[in-house]
Image (cartoon, helix red, strand yellow):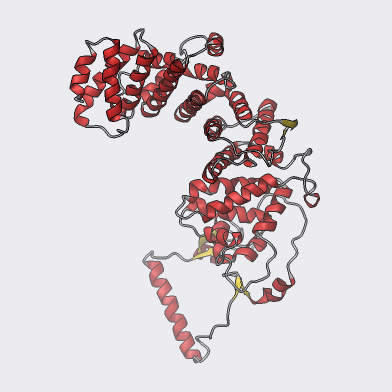
Amino acid sequence: MDLNNIVSQLENTNEEETEKLLLQYNRENSHTFSFDQTEESLRIKLCQGVLSVLGRQVQPSCQKTCLETLRILSRDKRVLGPVATREGMLILGGLARLNPGEEGDENQKNGQEDTQSEEEERVVVEALKCLCNVVYNSPAAQQVCVDVQLAHGLCAILHTARTWHHEVGLFTLRLVFLLSALRPDVRGVFRRELHAVRLLTEVLEFTLDVSWVGPYEAAPPDPQALPMPAEDNERTMEALKALFNLTLSDTGGEEDDHQFRIIAAILRHLLMLKTETEDKTEEAHSHAINLLNNLPVSCLDVLIDVPVQGGLEMYSGKNLDAIQMLIDFMAKRMDKQGSNYKEGLTPVLSLLTEGSRHHREIRRFIKAQVLPPLKDVKIRPEIGTTTRNKLVRLMTHVDMGVKQTAAEFLFVLCKESVDNLLKYTGYGNAAGLLVARGLLAGGRGETQYSDDEDSDTEEYKSAKPFINPITGHVEEPMPNPIEEMTEEQKEYEAQKLVNMFDKLSRQNVIRPMGVMPDGTLAPLEETLCDPPR
């Protein structure tokens, strides 16, 4: 249907004809995501016309059709001018029952007391979908949201989480996520004024059906229970994404610490749950891990302190089931072909690193699986299919963030001892970390660890004198290339090598470096001139 005809007819039709006209447009464009730029001015006029209809008192069926049209149009950020105004956003906010601009208490009361027909609820859902698109695509609309205090209306809806239907909850949570992601100033409003962290935590608690058996311990899921329904999982992930945004900033205070421990306990419960598909389970766990990274590391003890369920005597009675889930998640992400390690793997590595750094039992449990006592040292540490082999390979990954995170993880598992790290990785793989840490001369990192000693296997002790410290394995004997040379030939080759290095150095192709007494790298001439200490 010609867009020009729709725009011209829209101005002079009644409600029934308007609905029929727009229904046809919606059917034809429901899957349209790229638009003809030559019709941009017509689409702007259509936006204005649809908003004009929505501003009048029309039936819910007509409102729903208009909002569907507006949702299609809102996929094009160039035509959002009429919507991204105070009037346009107030219309959409009102239809979404967010009642922007009204007092929070009254707004909350309205949200709790209104009863809606099925058709009216579809209007609310479509209005929320429109708001999500408009807020995502328009900085001007984001500013209007701040001006009309849309966050207050969203939090009022969060108060009614136990009564809302799936799509209302899903798109309310998505709008909270978008607004908090795109407007850092709104995060403070959500958090300090509206207590959205607590509200979102309650949403998670209700959605995941958490039953408390201790201050920060949820009852374990029933092994015979059905997987988490897809709709519950969708809302859970949106709530986790919103909470991630709201916990990005610095935190502090007893109230925050209590709230974060509750969140950690809920996330532990989530790690124990399965959804209807393995991919969706992994996705939910990924969001849980991202959020755990935002919590103070002191709260991670909630993951292993579950007195009612009990734990392992060899790990001081701690329950390491959640840590096992994190290790399994890490292994899956390392094995995923073509995956983005920076986004998919580094969050779980960072979480396990910080947990290991601050909690002895977590470190011991992970090390037992990732860096078991060495036996076979005939193969280079980066070759093979074990978790250790894969992590050592990542120490030389092209992405700086990935290689640093993997190296730091192994370093912490070795209690930040350079000698222990080199035992498992070889000097060549660890060089990048040692340079960054200023530990080329050996030593330890700054963190203090327990004094328990790692015992070497008899196989390792017997092979240790023959291990190449650079490659980290026992090499087959190689023929000596200078064995049959005369002393004059050796001197000639040595001088030739010196001249080659000198030429490359003068041309700035290479720069010879040396190790300073403090373990840092410096130009060779400086290390030679530096007096002994």
Percent across and percent down for residue 189 are 53, 21
Nearer to the camera, 69 or 437: 69
Location of residue 470 (image quadrant): bottom right
In the image, residue 172 sits, relative to residue 318, either above or below, namely above
Residue shown at 63% from the left, 41% from the top: 271
In the displayed structure, 330 sits above or below 212; it is below
The vertical placement of 387 against 14, above or below, is below
Residue 501 in view in this figure: yes
Q: Is residue 169 left or right of residue 456?
A: left
x, y percentage for residue 531? 60, 63
Q: Which residue is drawn at 49% across and 92% down?
A: 486
Question: Residue 344 placed where, x, y %?
Answer: 51, 47
Can you say which quadrant of the picture contains the N terminus? top left
Q: Residue at x 38, y 64 (%)?
A: 508
Q: In which quarter of the image is the C terminus?
A: bottom right
Q: In this view, does 523 lie to the left or right of 300?
A: left
Is residue 416 at all visible to an observer of this figure?
no
Above or below, 343 relative to 389: above
Horizontal side of 415 relative to 139 (left or right) equals right
Q: Quadrant of residue 269?
A: top right
Residue 247, position in %: x, y? 57, 32
Q: Looking at this view, is 278 or 287 the one in front?
A: 278
